[in-house]
Image (cartoon, rainbow, N blue to C red):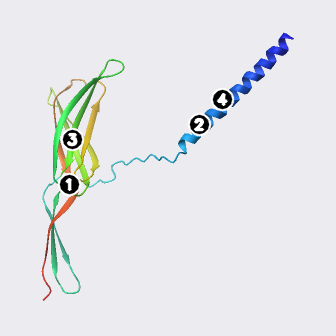
Amino acid sequence: MEKRDQKILEIFLGLILIIMLIIMILLFTSSASTGKTISTVTNSYNTYNYYQRPSTQFYFQKDCNTMEKQIKKPLEYSSRKEIQISKGVFGNEIKSYVVYVKNKEDVGGYFTVRFYFYDYYEGKRSQLTTKYIQPNEEEAFVFKTIKKEPYGYNQWTYEVFSNSNVLVKTYANECN
């Protein structure tokens, strides 16, 4: 009788295990189909405007030979920086170099922040990050160092570039 009871117990535990696996599969597949989608935008705007000058474009209309002149300028912004230091799980130091950029225009656009890091031996390292910023919104550009750098950084700075332009003025000659 003892072997028969052991065999029944093993079959019962096997059935419980199979039922638990089916329930787990159903839970994982149902959470993936709840209608929430994850979308990732990775640097979809690759035209960098490093020269922050207003651009001028000329357009000719075919019907009456008029000339239209448009002047565009980069988006206006304000920026500030800070460094955040925290401890990791294993006691290591995590440094977050953060630049906050605020779009001051009434149109959204792409902004690029170039981080510059200098070590004690005049070594220089740079890192680019590009993000889209909504009108009159502020966005944080973050660069993290988790591992300890060989000599450490004694100074860091940044540059902000507006990759989008806004129309300032349009001039047009009248048809004669």
Question: Is 113 situated above or below 92?
Answer: below
- Kindly report which numbered mark, 4 or 1, lies closer to the viewer in this rendering: 4
Who comes first in sequence, dot 1 or dot 2?
Answer: 2
Question: Is 79 situated above or below 75?
Answer: above
Who comes first in sequence, dot 1 or dot 3?
Answer: 1
x then y, percent, for residue 125: 21, 35
Q: CA distance from mark 1 to mark 3?
A: 19 Å
- Kindly report which numbered mark, 2 or 3, lies closer to the viewer in this rendering: 2
Residue type, numbered disc 2: Leu
Q: CA distance from mark 2 to mark 3?
A: 40 Å
Residue 49 is tagged as 1
x then y, percent, for residue 10: 76, 19
Residue type, numbered disc 4: Met
For disc 3, the neighbor class at 10 Å (few under 14, some 14 to 19, many from 20) is: some
Furthest-right residue in this view: 1
User: Which residue is rendered at x = 81% and y = 18% of the image?
Assistant: 7
Who comes first in sequence, dot 2 or dot 3?
Answer: 2
Labels 3 & 4 near each other (Cβ < 8 A): no
Question: Is 52 situated above or below 95?
Answer: below
Residue type, numbered disc 1: Asn
Residue 27 is tagged as 2
x then y, percent, for residue 128: 25, 43
Residue under pointer 3: 100
Residue type, numbered disc 3: Tyr
